[in-house]
Structures are given as C-alpha cells and as structure tokens.
Amino acid sequence: MATRPSNRKRNQWTVELLAIQPVHRILEIGCGPGIALKSCAAKVSEGGVVGIDHSEVMVSQASKRLAGEIKAGRADVRLVGLFDGSLEDGTYDRVYSLNVFQFFLDMEEGFRRVHECLVSGGKVATTYQPRSKNPTRGNALEMAASIEKTMKAVGFVGIERHELLFKPAPVICVIGRKTEA
Ligand SMILES: C[S@@+](CC[C@H](N)C(=O)[O-])C[C@H]1O[C@@H](n2cnc3c(N)ncnc32)[C@H](O)[C@@H]1O
C-alpha cells in the first residue's frame, strides 16, 4: 500500500485539498502506513498531526515512517478505532480519511464522531475510490452523493465535491465544514 504510486498520488491530492496552515491540528482516520500523515506533518510547524488506525500492523508502519516527527513532538500514531470513544472533542482543525468510510456499517455515526472532534469552522475531507470489479465513474459519484447527504445530516455545511481523473475510476473527495460557534 505504501509503495504504490497510485496510492501516493491519491494521498498527496487529498493533503493539498486540506489547505493546511502551520498552526493546524490534524487528525487522520485509518492512517494506514502513514503516507498522507507524513506530508501533513511537514506542513504543521506549529501544530501537530494524529493518525489513528485499528490495525496493529498499520500503526507499526506509520510509527516507523513518522519516527522523526513523533520524536520531535509533532506527531502521534494511535492504535484506536474511530468508534472507541477515545478521541478528544473540539480539538482538530482538519479531520480526513482516504478509503476508510466505505467500511463503516454506520457512516452517519462516523461523521457524527468527526463533527465532535473538530473545532468550530474546522473541515472534514473524505476521499474515496471505488475498488469493486470493473469500477465506474458512476460508482464514485454514487458514493460521493451518499457522503454529501450524510455530512449534511450531521450538520456539516459548505459541502464541496472534488474529482481526480484516475484509472480505472476517478477518485472523489468530499469536504464539509463545521459551522462557527
Ligand atoms: C484501505 S486502507 C487505507 C489506508 C490509508 N488511508 C491509505 O489510503 O493509504 C483502510 C484503513 O482504515 C483502517 N480502518 C478501518 N476502519 C477503521 C476504524 N473504524 N478506525 C480506525 N481505522 C480504521 C484500516 O485498518 C486500514 O488501515
């Protein structure tokens, strides 16, 4: 997963869409081997990044990849799941994920949890690329519509949809904002 150029491209695209400022506190859900998290860490000289994943193997890989940033106190990689109830409320300026929300049995509960973790005015970004057999643009757009609907249902505003042309099917990223208090 870490070495595939396609995965690196998807990760980098998502990080650029986050419009990260040096002071931002960033949370990645399902950080896997930590490709995007490492790029984010390089952008937050005064803030920090936290990556969570419920796979021990992935947490180990991400921890190795970000060893320098962890030592410097700018990164933390945790073996926890989004639904474990261990994340801090009202803390993060950006919360993002790549190819994770499609695995949730209850996507709405996932976005509710993300909403709680964000500061007022903070943003969520959810990236997805269909991985079914012979995936189509239609599959990607269907998921985008479902993500948008769910984000709106939990209170996100200013929903934006981005699309990256990709083979065999495009990558979509949906961004939403938590309203100012
Ligand atoms: C397809 S991988 C994507 C990894 C990484 N985001 C990337 O694109 O390189 C999905 C990751 O999400 C993690 N994951 C799935 N459900 C999770 C949950 N509820 N909480 C935390 N991590 C989760 C998995 O362990 C896995 O590492």
Image: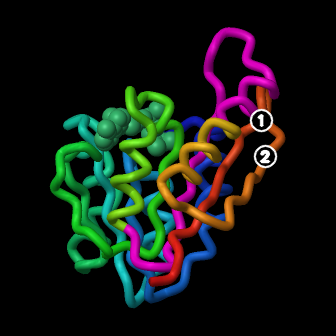
Point 56% across, 57% down: residue: 125
- Name the one closer to the observer, 75 or 132: 132
Disc 2 residue type (three-letter): Leu
Callouts 1 and 2 close, C-beta under 8 Å: yes
The image quadrant where one finds the C terminus is bottom left
Mark 2 near ligand 1 (CB under 8 Å)? no
Quadrant of the picture in which ligand 1 is shown: top left
Point 51% across, 70% down: residue: 178
Residue 49 picture location, percent across and down: 36, 69
> Is residue 21 shown above or below 114?
below
> What colouring does the structure picture have?
rainbow
Magenta-span inclusion, residue 18:
no
Which residue is identified by label 1? 170
- Callout 2 secondary element: strand
**Badge 1: how crowded within 10 Å, few (<14), some, or many (20+)?**
many
Is residue 72 visible in the rendered image? The answer is: yes
Residue 75 picture location, percent across and down: 29, 70
- Name the one closer to the observer, 69 or 86: 86
Which residue is identified by label 2? 164
> Is residue 6 shown above or below 16?
above
Picture disc at residue 52: none
Q: Earlier in the sequence, mark 1 or mark 2?
A: 2
Residue 131 picture location, percent across and down: 62, 21
Is residue 60 visible in the rendered image? The answer is: no
Quarter of image, res 81: top left
Residue 56 picture location, percent across and down: 20, 37
Distance Cα–Cα, label 1 vs label 2? 6 Å
Q: Which residues are drawn in magenta?
A: 118-143
Quarter of image, res 33: top left
- Name the one closer to the observer, 115 or 33: 115
